[in-house]
Structures are given as structure tokens and as C-alpha cells.
Amino acid sequence: MRILWIFAHPERHSLNGALLDEGLRTLDALGHEHRVSDLYAMGWKAVVDAEDFRGPGHERLVVGAAQEQAYGQGELSADIRAEQEKLAWADVVVFQFPLWWFGPPAILKGWFDRVLVQGFAFGLKDAAGTTLRYGDGGLAGKRVLIVTSVGARESGFGPRGIHGPVDEVLFPLLHGTFWYTGMAPLAPFTVYGADRMTPAGAQDATEALSHRLRGLSDEAPLRYRHEQGGDYDDELVLRPEVAPGRSGVAAQRLDARDRVPA
Amino acid sequence: MRILWIFAHPERHSLNGALLDEGLRTLDALGHEHRVSDLYAMGWKAVVDAEDFRGPGHERLVVGAAQEQAYGQGELSADIRAEQEKLAWADVVVFQFPLWWFGPPAILKGWFDRVLVQGFAFGLKDAAGTTLRYGDGGLAGKRVLIVTSVGARESGFGPRGIHGPVDEVLFPLLHGTFWYTGMAPLAPFTVYGADRMTPAGAQDATEALSHRLRGLSDEAPLRYRHEQGGDYDDELVLRPEVAPGRSGVAAQRLDARDRVPA
């Protein structure tokens, strides 16, 4: 398999750096090809602006339209095109980051904002003219794994924990970004208590990551609903007979009672 | 009242620019003071890195600790200190942004990552040594309003919509960022269908925003649970007798059946 590993941590000499090292060693041992985008080391530009688009200037910048046009004409900036090429190459994408304010650091958010443009990652139509989204799209066929570290304890991220279940907190990525563009998200690999990590705890975490990576191709992804699978009406609302009485982000799972494996 | 308006849109000549103009006119008419941080116009630096901290270099950057230390010693970079000063001044904070990948643009995510540091926004303790979080903290007493624009239709963001309810999609901000630091979040002001907005629709949206702002001081915030309010056990899990049988981010609302007003 071909694995693209997006690393969004400012310090290579860290728990996250050790997880990356162990992850790449495991992929090597399995004979997988891998490429790494170390966003801090690359000096990745986080912010979408008019400099992302070559060609004639924009009197009034409409980001979505400018991105789609520049993509179609091969005029996105070189750093964006390089990431799109890596993404097209990959069978599996790993996004590794410390959880800051319950989401990705700005440098990674900016990777999504700048790389996943209309025409490439979404906004594609099938032969009948239906727009492909949620389970289908420009990145269909790829699997994706979040590897993240959290300062807090695990209990607070459980089904009734104060922070919210980790798969619901990460719903904007898992469902709104990955599944939206057609990628199949695996359950996030989460290291809790990262602020008070002992050497033994770090060892356990790297071994657990290695174990997850060895099962990468066999693991069942999270079971979100396909937009075109018959569960939604024309207003993109769940039909009354689907998951009756349920609502919220949890209702978008086919198996809302499945929890992220430890 | 004193209102800080954080504007995170790359194009001032836009629907969002018109909403900002109308918002500031309304605040003026009401006699409120306001200050604006136009992040794109300011060239706001989105990415946390070692340059945020003056003083001796860091052999190994531990972001949270470096932020807390630099804050305590007055050695955060000047752009961060200026935003903290505005935030301390404000009674109400408005965050305005286009919803990109179901979250804030990177430039705004970086504002949270860089400005809301430990010692200032969170990590404070009361006299008994209890850490103040979720309903209490460094920013307690302030109210906060999200003003956001979405390309998609409203139906998909309803209780059973494919994108998830807007207050659950925005949970990392509303609960994990605002409520975590003590701020009381109001229901988000959301403009749907922004990609196909007619002039009449834009007029309706600016009038609706003006209406919301006129009621700013009377409006009831979203009812999240206080960490110290007795609903959570020592593991930060809801006690069995609280919201029995419920789980997920929705269970963190005292009134999970309340929906965001139109």
C-alpha cells in the first residue's frame, strides 16, 4: 500500500515525533511505500488567500470559485499541487496532530482549506449529473486514519464524558471532511493523558500505534451513511423510517452504538 | 456594552463584509463600543511556533508550557498580547467566518491556538485549588456569538440533516473553546445558501443579524452544564442519574431538545 502521512506537530522531539518514527518503521517492515508531509518543517502556508491562485488577479475573491477555476487550469500554487499529487498517489492517508481546542492545529486546518478544492476533492458529478458526496467523491477508495494526542484523560472523551465522545468531537473531520470527499475514516487513534506521559506510557502508545498500522488494510472503517444510499430525502434529511426517534451527529452513523475501540 | 468583533473572511466586498458593516452600524446605533480584528487585513499569523515566545530559546518546544510561561512573564509576541488585551476589554465577542470544512478557516483557528493560552483563558484555579473550566475560567462573564455563512441549504443542518445539527458541528467551538474558558455561547447566527445568495436574501440576512444584535444582552445563552455544577463525577463523566440513557455531545446540553432559533 501507499501511505501519505501528514504530520502537523511543531516539535519533532516529542511524543508525537516518537509515534511518527515508530509508525514509519512499522510501514517499512510491512513493505508499504510511504511519503511524509511534515507541515511545520515544510513551512506550510496555512492561510487561503489570493496568492494561492496564479493567473489574472481577482477583483473580488470568491474562494470556492477561484479554487475550482485555478485547479481546472493547473494554476493553483505549486505547494498545493504537490500535496494534491501526493494525495492522489496514496491508498491510505494518516493525519497526525495534537488536539488543540478540540480540533486540528491551524497549520493542518489550512492544509484542508487549501488542498481539498472543488473539482479535485469534491463537486464531481456522476454520469447522471448527481454530485458525489458523503461516501463518494474525488477521494473515494482511500482510507484515512487520525493519530492524535490529547492532554486530558480518556474518561472525559467517553460516551457520557464532559468533552464529548472523541468521534463526535472529530465529526467535522471524520464525516464532514473525509467521508464528504469519499474517504473511509477509521476509528481515530488517540493517545490520552499526553501532558503527563511517562516513558512507559509512551512505549505503550507507540506499540499500540504499530499494532493498529499492522491491521490497517483489514480494519473496518466507521460506518457512516452514503448520501446516495437511500437514507436521505431530497432535502438531505434522514427519511422518517431511518433511525426513528434519533437525531444529532450520532444518527449519521449506521451503528451509533459502536464505540471507538480502545 | 463593549463588543470585540473578530472578522475572518478574506474578502471585504462580500456577503460577510455586508454583514459586518450592518453589524457595526447596529452596534453604533445602540450606543455600544466596538473594536474589530479583521484577521486577513491584519495579516494575522495563524501558526503557533517558537517565534510566539520571546526570551530564551526552547531546546524542545512544549507548546502549552511555553505559552503559559511566556504569558506569565509578559513575553508573548506583541500581536498575541494585543488580542488578549482586546478580549479582556470586551463584554461580548463576535466571531464571524465562512464555515470551511465544517469549522473556522485556518486564520481563525490559529487565533484560538495562539491567543487562548493557559494562565489567561484557562488553567486558573479557585481558592480551593479547583481548576476552573466549562462555565468558569479566565473569560467568565463574557458572551460570545458566532456569525457564519454556509454554502449548503439549511435542511441539511437540522436535527436529522446529513451535515449534523449546526450546534453539534460547532461543538468544538461552542463548548470546547468558549464554554471551556467560561464564556457563555449564544446560538450561532447562520446564513445558509450563501453560495447562491440573491440580493433580497442578503438583505434579509443583514436585517436578521441586526435584529439578533439588538437583543444581544437579553438573549439566553445555550445551556451547557457547569463542570462544578454537580452533574459530573471525578472522572468527568455524567453521573448515572443525570440524563439517564443519553450520551454524545447532545447530553452535554441541559436542554438537548432546544434547537437553535431560526
Image (cartoon, coloured by chain):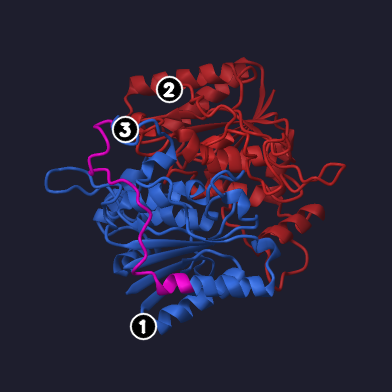
Chain colours: A red, B blue
Reading the image, the residue beneath label 2 is A205
Q: In which quarter of the image is the C terminus of chain A?
A: top left
Residue B31 tag number:
1
Which quarter of the figure has residue B53?
bottom left
Task: Check residue B222 for magenta coloring.
Answer: yes
The CA span between labels 3 and 2 is: 24 Å
Reading the image, the residue beneath label 3 is B237
The CA span between labels 2 and 1 is: 55 Å
Q: A212 or B188, which is in the foreground?
A: B188
Tell me the magenta residue range: B211-239
The CA span between labels 1 and 3 is: 44 Å
Residue A195 higher or lower than A203, as above or below: below
Three-letter amino acid code at the position of disc 1: Gly
Tell us which disc is closer to us: 2 or 1.
1
Three-letter amino acid code at the position of disc 3: Val
Do callouts 1 and 3 mark residues in contact (Cβ within 8 Å)?
no
In the image, taking residue B5 as reference, residue B118 lies left or right, namely left
The answer to whether one can see residue B36 in this image is no
Image location of residue A246, percent across then percent down: 52, 36
Task: Check residue A11 for magenta coloring.
Answer: no
Q: What element carries label 1?
A: loop
